[in-house]
Amino acid sequence: MVTIGLQQETEEINRKLDDKVTRQVAEIMEAAVIDEEQDREIPPVAPAWKFSMPFAGVRYFSYD
């Protein structure tokens, strides 16, 4: 009789844990999809030459 009670409790605990894990995985997957969509909205920046002149007669060029 004791083992029947423990088996039912074990099954209930396993079911609760499965539900919790399923919810957490679903939240993680939703967050990953949202991050991917946000990444696609930002257009890539092409590398270009940049010019700066900190003071007269000195010029710095860089390529990013």
Image: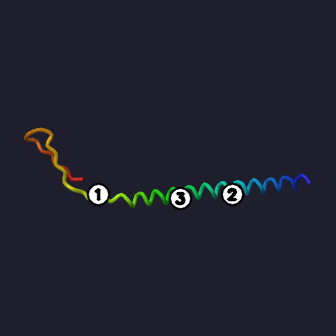
Contact check, label 1 and label 3, Cβ < 8 Å:
no
Q: CA distance from mark 1 to mark 3?
A: 27 Å
Q: Which residue is mark 2?
A: 18
Label of residue 45 in the image: 1
Q: Residues within 10 Å of mark 2 (few under 14, many from 20)?
A: few
Q: Residues within 10 Å of mark 3 (few under 14, many from 20)?
A: few
Residues 16 and 41: in front is 41
Instruction: Give the mark nearer the N terminus: 1 vs 3.
Output: 3
Q: Which secondary structure lies at badge 1?
A: loop
Residue at the image position 46 percent from the left and 56 percent from the top: 35
Above or below — where is 60 with respect to 47?
Answer: above
The kind of residue on which mark 3 rests is Glu
Instruction: Give the mark nearer the N terminus: 1 vs 2.
Output: 2
Q: Which residue is mark 3?
A: 30
The kind of residue on which mark 1 rests is Val
Instruction: Give the mark nearer the N terminus: 2 vs 3.
Output: 2
Residue at the image position 12 percent from the left and 44 percent from the top: 59
Q: Quadrant of residue 29?
A: bottom right
Q: CA distance from mark 1 to mark 2?
A: 44 Å
Q: CA distance from mark 2 to mark 3?
A: 18 Å
Residue 15 is left or right of residue 31, and the answer is right
Above or below — where is 55 with respect to 15?
Answer: above
Q: Quadrant of residue 22?
A: bottom right
Q: Residues within 10 Å of mark 1 (few under 14, many from 20)?
A: few
Q: Which secondary structure lies at badge 2?
A: helix
Residue at the image position 7 percent from the left and 41 percent from the top: 57
Residue 49 is left or right of residue 22, and the answer is left
Residue 37 horizontal/vertical position (percent): 44, 60
Contact check, label 1 and label 2, Cβ < 8 Å:
no
Residue at the image position 55 percent from the left and 56 percent from the top: 28
Q: Quadrant of residue 56?
A: top left
Residue most extreme to the left = 57
